[in-house]
Amino acid sequence: MKRLSFILIRVFATLGLFLGTGYITYAEVNPKPFVVPELTSWTGAEGKFMPTGRVIVKGNKEVFRIATDFITEYKQLTGKNLSIAKGKAAPGDFIFELSEKNKALGEEGYSLEIGNTARLSAQTAKGLFWGTRTILQISEQTTENSIPKGTTTDVPEYKLRGMVIDCGRKYIPIDYLQNLVKIMAYYKMNTLEVHLNDNGFRQYFDNDWDKTQAAFRLECDTYPGLTAKDGSYTKKEFIDLQILGENNFVEIIPEIDVPAHSLAFTRYRPEIASKDYGKDHLDLFKPETYEFVDGLFKEYLEGKNPVFRGPRVHIGTDEYSNAKKDVVEKFRSFTDHYIKYVESFGKKAVLWGALTHAKGDTPVKADDVLMFCWYNGYADPKDMKEKGYQLVSIPDGLVYIVPAAGYYYDYLNCKHLYDNWTPATIGNQKFEENDPAIEGGMFAVWNDHAGNGISTKDIHHRIYPALQTLAVKCWTGKNTKLPYEEFEKQSKNISEAPDVNELGRWYTDNHRLAPANETVCTIKEVTPGMNMPREEIGYDYSVSFTVDGAEEKKGTELFRSKNAVFYLSDPQSGKLAFARDGYLNKFNYAIKPGTKVTITIQGNNRMTRLLINGKKHEELNAQTVYVMGDKIDYQYGDNQIFKPTMYTTKDKMHYQRTLVFPLAKAGNFKSKITDLVIVNSLGK
C-alpha cells in the first residue's frame, strides 16, 4: 500500500496536480545538453551537478596531462579554479579514469555519468580528452557552470573528421593554424591537412607563368631559395604545430602536391616543367623530375625525428592531364612510385582521387592507402573501394569553400549538409552508413583566387560554421535529433575554443558573450600608446570616435592589433586607411588639421564603411579587378603594399576590402581622440 501511494504521489506531482492543501512540483528529467557535436546518446536524470573544485585522476601520465590542461581551459572559459586531488571522490568532484570495462567505446568513445560526482571514463586517453571537450562546452553555457545530471555513452560514427586548408595560394600564419588546431579539437575534429604548395591561375596574371603566383611554404635546405618569400613556416614551427596537434589529438597531414599544381617547383627548377601541359605540370618523362621530388620528400621524411612527424603524408596526384595514353601511364607510375617512396620511410600515403580520370594499365598500390574522393569523374568511389583504397568523403559540390570566387561555395550550405549529408554520400553516390571503406569526411578551403584581398579572418569566418556542421555530421552522423535551426542558434553561443577568439567576438568580464546590438566599450579619451581592453572586434561592428585634427605624418597609426592596422594617415597619401594581410585599403578622406570631426567605421564580412559626422561617406566593398599585379610578394610585411592592377581580360576577380577592426594598442598620433564608442552591430 505504501508503495502504491508513493507511485501515485510521483504521478500526480509530475502532472503538476494539487495534493492536499499544497502544490507539489517534481523536477523534470534533464533533456540532452547542447554540445557540438551532438551526443550520440543521453539518458537524463533529475537535478544538476555543481563542481566544488576538485578533479580526481585515475590513470597514467597522459591522463594527468589531460586533467591539467582541462583545469587550465576550465579557468579560461569560466574564470573558476579547479585542482587535482587525491583520495576518495566526494560530491561535486570530477573523476577522470581509464577503464577497460566498456569495449564498445573503442579508441575515441567515452562515457560520462553525471550524478553527485561527474565521472568521465574511456578506454584511451583520446577518448578521455574528447569527453573533457563535452564537459567544457556544457560548463560554459550557464552562468553558474552547472552540468545537468544524466549519462551519455558518446562514440563517433566516423573515425576521420577534418578539413583541408590551402596555404599554398595564400599564406596562412602559423599562429592561426595553431588556433585552428585548438578549435578543431574543441569540436572533436581530428584531422587537419595542410596544403603546402600551389599556384594561382595564369589567366589572372596576364597569362604569364612568370607572373603567376606560386609558393612552397616550408623551410627547405635541400633546395635553398625554394621556400616562399611572402610567408612560410620554419621546420621548427611546423614540428611544433604537429606536436600541438598530437597533444590535442588532431593529426596534421602535410601535403606536397605533385605532379600538377607544381609551379613553385618548376620556377625553381625550370627544366622539370612540362612543355606540353603548362609550367604548373611536372615533366613525368624526365629522370630529373624524380630526382627533385625524391629529394624534396626525403628532407622531411628521413631520420629518427623527421619534420613530418605523423603517420600519414599526402602526395597530391591531383588534376594532371590525361590527354594521351602514354601520359596517363606515366602519371600512374609516378603515383605508385611516391606511394611506395613515402612508405619506405615508415609512413602511410594519402592522395587525391584521380585514377578514373587517369584510367590505364599501370598498377597503382591500393592496400593501406587513403584516397580523398573529391569528384567522381576523377575517381569513381565504388570503383576505388573495389580496388582496395580507404576513402575520405570530400565531395567538391558539397564541401568545397573557395572564398569570394563565384564558384563552389563562398560559405558552405550548412543547412543542407546538416539535414542531408554524412560521409556516406560522395557526390552522387550513396554508401551504407559506416561502410568500412569510408574512413570519414572532410571539407576544404581553396584560395584559388590568389591576391583577391581575402584575409585570414575572412577565411576563418567561412571555416567556423562549416567546421561546426561537419563536426556533427562526422561524429553523430545520421542520428542527429536537433533541428538545424535550433543547432545554428545554439552553436553561436559556444566558444571557438578555450582562450581562442579568432572571430573577434566581444565577451563580458564574467566570460559571457555580449548580446548583439550592444555598446560593449566606451572610452572618454584615447591617448597615444594606450593599451586597449581587447585585441579586436569582429563582424558586425561599429567603431566611432571624435578627432580634433593635428598635422600627422604619413604612416601614423590610430589602432593596431596583431592582425591589422588602422591608419589616421596612411603611408602613401595621408588618408584614413587600413592594412591587413599585406593589403592597404584607403578611404577617400583625410583628417584636416584644426578641424573636429566624428568618424565611424562599420564593418561586416562584405565591406568596410566610413561615416563622417553620422553620414555615409564611402563604402569599400568587393572591387572587380581582372588580374593581379606583376609582383609576387604581395602578402605580409610593412614594405609589401599591394594594389590590384587591371588588364583587359574577361576573367574577373573580386578584390575584398574587409576589416576585423584592430583595438589592441593606440598609435603615436598628435590629434586628440575622444568619445570612443564600440558597438557589436553594424548600425545604420
Image (cartoon, rainbow, N blue to C red):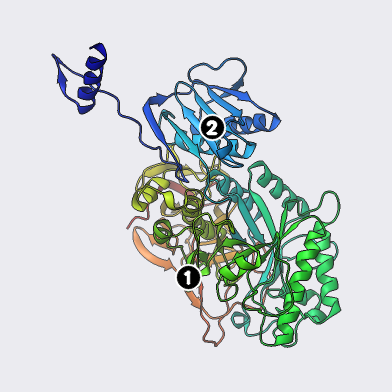
Q: Nearer the viewer, residue 621 or 118?
A: 118
Q: Residue at x 62, y 54 (%)?
A: 192
Q: Nearer the viewer, residue 108 or 531?
A: 108
Residue 322 position, x and y percent, is 66, 83
Q: Is residue 226 above or below residue 19?
A: below
Q: Nearer the viewer, residue 574 or 465?
A: 465
- Residue denoted by label 1: 428
Q: Residue at x 27, y 14 (%)?
A: 3
- Lateral position of residue 250 relative to residue 621, left or right: right
Q: Is residue 350 above or below residue 141?
A: below
Occupied quadrant, residue 233: bottom right
- Residue denoted by label 2: 74
Q: Examine the rendering and report whether any part of residue 281 can be seen.
A: yes
Residue type for callout 1: Asn
Residue 490 position, x and y percent, is 38, 45
Say which quadrant the C terminus sits in: bottom left
Say which quadrant the N terminus sits in: top left
Occupied quadrant, residue 246: top right
Q: Residue most toward the front? A: 1
For label 1, the crowd category at 10 Å Cα-Cα, with few meaning under 14, some 14 to 19 and many 20 or more, is: few
Q: Nearer the viewer, residue 643 or 118?
A: 118
- Lateral position of residue 291 relative to residue 373, left or right: right
Nearer-N-terminus badge (1/2)? 2
Residue type for callout 2: Tyr
Occupied quadrant, residue 443: bottom right
Mark 1 vs mark 2, CA separation in Å: 43 Å
Q: Residue at x 67, y 82 (%)?
A: 321
Between marks 1 and 2 in the image, the one whose residue lies nearer the viewer: 1
Say what secondary structure mark 1 lies in. loop
For the residues bearing labels 1 and 2, Cβ distance under 8 angstroms:
no
Residue 71 position, x and y percent, is 58, 30
Q: Is residue 87 above or below residue 163?
A: above
